[in-house]
Amino acid sequence: MVVVAAVVGSVWFFYPFLSERHYRDGFQYDAMGLYELAIRELEMAVRYTPWETQYIMTLAKSYESLAAQTSLSVPDRLNALSKAEALYQDCVDLDSLNPWQQNRLAAVWTARAALLPTPDAQLYLDKATRAIQFAARLDAQNPLFQLNYAHHLHTNNRLDEALPLYLKAIAMDPNMMEARYNLADLYRRRNRLDLTLIQYEYIYEHNPEFGNINVGLADTYSRLNRLDKAIEAMEREVQRRPDFVEGISFLITLHSKRQQWDRVASLYFQLIALNPGSDTYFASFAEAVRRSGKVDKAKANLQQMMVQNPNPDLQRLLQLL
């Protein structure tokens, strides 16, 4: 019996080391987007140390990522979500007052709702709302949970309920830019463009690289008829993203209002370069060049380009001028 006990003890002693190895491999596979391999390794990690909630949560997140793959059938995606839900529920059973686990359950229910018909979807959305609200109450001093609850209400068009939660999150952390960005959208929907602009300008001042902040500024300035500021913001975005077709098109509209045809022509040429073989913007480019009064200069530039790159698009443009 002593020998048997010693053998069993030695095996159990090595389980945490084996678990850690499988967890690291699974984590790497997940980061590479190889979710099925990640799940296989993480399941081994959980099998060796079923009390490690970190491993359980990571495995559940891999199932969530797998469920997000649109290449899978809906039943397969729902099955992956069911497995994630069961794992998160295990964590909740171990610690029912952990707000992070409540939020993860809510994320699974929200994802499930997106794959189900309306009556069933509403059931899961209601469950998600209760879990997110519970998490926000569990850690009422954490701005992340207030933001998460506000965003959930926001996306479900419950704007009156979302507003005070965004304000609460910002009061806790004035530099929580996502809360400010979402609050700006809420104000925009209410046509309070003055308040929208306050939030966008704060974000730009403190974090000018925040995603789409220039787009938000340009749209708001344009609605307020502050065209010069709108153009300035949109030019920054197009310079940062020269293949941003929607941004270039919006910038064309703004410059057209100012009758800045030389810039309009160059923007149309940028769209032509992004769409080789398409003549969608040819006529608009030619018209902008004519309005700019610089037809001869445009022809000379096109002829010079053709020397280096004799493609048919340039030839057709030259013929239009």
Image (cartoon, grey):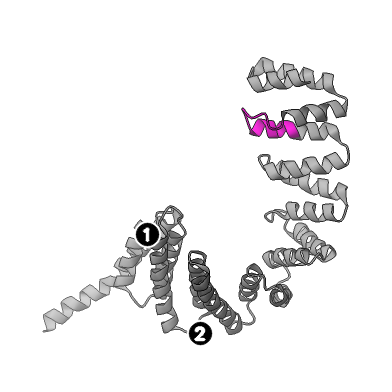
In the displayed orientation, state which residue is furthest to the top: 307
Disc tally is: 2
Q: Is residue 43 left or right of residue 221?
A: left
**Residue at screen point 49% across, 76% down:** 101
Three-letter code, disc 2 = Leu
Q: Is residue 94 left or right of residue 286?
A: left
List x then y, in percent, for residue 75: 39, 62
Q: Quadrant of the N terminus?
A: bottom left
User: How far is mark 1 from mark 2, CA to CA?
Assistant: 28 Å
**Residue at screen point 64% across, 73% down:** 153
Contact, mark 1 vs mark 2 (Cβ under 8 Å): no
Q: In the image, which disc is placed on residue 97?
A: 2
Three-letter code, disc 1 = Ala
Q: Does 69 appear in magenta? A: no
Q: In this figure, which residue is indicated by the disc labeled 1?
A: 38
Q: In the image, which disc is placed on residue 152?
A: none
